[in-house]
């Protein structure tokens, strides 16, 4: 598992539901996944058991979107959409991880489809079910606010074109008021706390910085074009296919805007209403990125846009006129395009390649720890590595869920003593490691009989060879590597190296 997956499991692994909810407040996400995992983990603690929730909801999400596309367009478009949803690399990954996005997509698509059924049949009950699914989406991930706003505008436009709509509109308004009340509760109980801790700002200033518009640094037109391209590259994990998908999406919007609607048919959205629905989420997210509120482009935080992006791509592909009149051309082209995505992937960083997440790497690393690291040793871990060590070796959390006043936190991991930096979102790197070495030496002087080791895993962002070279002046002469993303090393702390060695080498 990656560190985020391990974190979500550790947060859910609490003695009671109340404690699981309180633990969920330390993350940047609403509590639903942690609360569901609190009970889901009773099925088992294995990777497969924990990931089966995402696998189930991710698969049903694809089917719901097929039903929605078939209802608002046609069967051919729906089949293209189903194929893209099932085999898009980014969605496969999201449907195999212990994260919030699979729940988000499942409940959002359910709300969208139920809304369409409510508008078709004029059913207040379907409208209530759509609202309930919307609430669960809000409790899954905060990007659902983009979906709520876009769906609300779309629903209002649809409702205003219907006749005999008083009860349906009243029901929809009640559902919107409920969503507003839920948002207010989340803002008061969670978002305001996160803002006080400056967690959103810390994330926006680090690895999500490229997806936020910075006045004076970014050019507006360039930002829109590059981030939009990056977003479609993220969905398909391939630059060329991503650009082609973006062009098909734009083609779909143009064709929908030019298409004439059937007069008097209120059971389906008009082409322009459908174009509005597809474009609105992108515009909302882009405006949020320009305001510095939310990232846009090439990150899983924009996965909610896949609902509209792949729907648009499907419409564009279905309506694209080809010079070859053959029913096999588009299916073959679709298969070749998806094959390229999987055979020649170039996903948007940061990421851990799928091959590097092979379970045997972690199994071998844990076996090495048990056989080669003597009982009583001190093991230093960074935050990502500590999360994974907690799940695979310790059986308990050895990292802080929130920032602590002290610089380092001590925990017990079986027969070992682990030491973890007390600041969340912290990873070993050339800029911060010298301070950790000084702490290692201090503890080593207090008890020179205990060996000191370092365990690092997860998103090792520095180039591997350079990072290992940086560690050698600190006594890490023979690091054990288990794939590119797991590193175990015994530290020789009697070495006379100083922190300047690392800085000069880095320069």
Image (cartoon, rainbow, N blue to C red):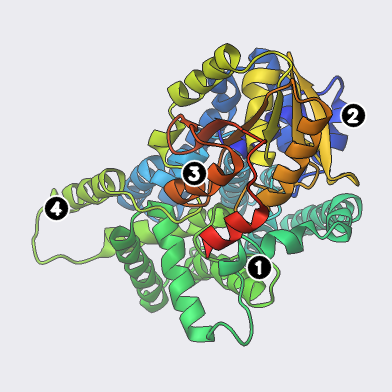
Cα distance, mark 3 to mark 4?
50 Å
Circle 3/circle 2 CB separation < 8 Å: no
Residue 494's label in the rendered image is none
Question: Image quadrant of residue 442?
Answer: top right
Identify the residue position indicated by label 2 in the image.
18
Q: Position of residue 208 (x, y in %)?
A: 61, 62
Identify the residue position indicated by label 3 in the image.
468
Circle 3/circle 4 CB separation < 8 Å: no
**Residue plotted at (63% across, 30% down):** 388
Cα distance, mark 3 to mark 2?
43 Å
* Mark 3 residue crowding within 10 angstroms, few (<14) / some (14–19) / many (20+): some
**Residue plotted at (33% across, 55% down):** 238
Identify the residue position indicated by label 4 in the image.
329
Q: Earlier in the sequence, mark 3 or mark 2?
A: 2
- Residue 163 seen from this side: no
Question: Image quadrant of residue 492?
Answer: top right
Q: Earlier in the sequence, mark 1 or mark 2?
A: 2
Cα distance, mark 1 to mark 3?
53 Å
């Amino acid at each position: 598992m990656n560190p985020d997956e391990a974190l979500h499991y550790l947060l859910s692994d609490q003695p009671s539901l109340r404690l699981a909810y309180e633990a969920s407040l330390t993350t940047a996400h609403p509590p639903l996944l942690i609360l569901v995992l609190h009970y889901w983990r009773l099925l088992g603690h294995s990777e497969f058991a924990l990931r089966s929730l995402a696998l189930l909801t991710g698969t049903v999400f694809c089917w719901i979107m097929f039903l929605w596309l078939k209802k608002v367009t046609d069967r051919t478009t729906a089949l293209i959409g189903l194929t893209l949803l099932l085999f898009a690399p980014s969605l496969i990954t999201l449907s195999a991880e212990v994260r919030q996005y699979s729940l988000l997509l499942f409940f959002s698509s359910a709300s969208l489809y139920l809304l369409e059924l409510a508008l078709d049949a004029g059913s207040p009950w379907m409208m209530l079910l759509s609202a309930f699914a919307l609430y669960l989406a809000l409790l899954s991930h905060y990007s659902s606010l983009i979906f709520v706003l876009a769906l609300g505008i779309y629903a209002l436009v649809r409702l205003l074109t219907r006749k005999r709509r008083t009860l349906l509109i009243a029901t929809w308004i009640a559902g919107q008021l409920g969503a507003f009340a839920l948002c207010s509760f989340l803002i008061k109980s969670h978002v305001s706390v996160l803002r006080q801790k400056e967690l959103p700002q810390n994330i926006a200033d680090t690895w999500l910085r490229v997806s936020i518009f910075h006045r004076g640094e970014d050019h507006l037109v360039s930002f829109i074009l590059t981030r939009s391209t990056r977003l479609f590259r993220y969905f398909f994990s391939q630059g060329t296919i991503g650009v082609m998908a973006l062009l098909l999406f734009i083609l779909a919007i143009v064709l929908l805007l030019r298409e004439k609607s059937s007069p008097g048919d209120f059971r389906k959205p008009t082409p322009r209403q459908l174009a509005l629905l597809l474009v609105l989420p992108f515009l909302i997210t882009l405006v949020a990125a320009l305001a510095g509120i939310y990232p846009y482009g090439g990150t899983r935080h924009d996965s909610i846009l896949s609902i509209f992006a792949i729907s648009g791509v499907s419409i564009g592909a279905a309506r694209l006129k080809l010079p070859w009149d053959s029913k096999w051309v588009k299916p073959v082209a679709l298969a070749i395009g998806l094959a390229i995505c999987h055979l020649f992937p170039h996903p948007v960083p940061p990421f851990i390649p799928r091959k590097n997440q092979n379970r045997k790497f972690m199994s071998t690393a844990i076996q090495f720890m048990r056989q080669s690291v003597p009982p009583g040793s001190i093991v230093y871990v960074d935050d990502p590595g500590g999360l994974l060590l907690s799940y695979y070796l310790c059986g308990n959390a050895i990292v802080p869920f929130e920032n602590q006043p002290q610089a380092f936190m001590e925990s017990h991991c079986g027969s070992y003593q682990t030491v973890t930096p007390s600041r969340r979102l912290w990873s070993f790197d050339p800029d911060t490691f010298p301070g950790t070495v000084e702490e290692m030496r201090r503890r080593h002087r207090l008890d020179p009989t205990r060996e000191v080791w370092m365990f690092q895993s997860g998103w090792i962002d520095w180039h591997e060879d350079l990072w290992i070279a940086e560690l050698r002046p600190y006594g890490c002469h023979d690091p054990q590597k288990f794939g590119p993303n797991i590193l175990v090393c015994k530290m020789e702390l009697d070495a006379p190296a100083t922190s300047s060695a690392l800085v000069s080498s880095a320069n």
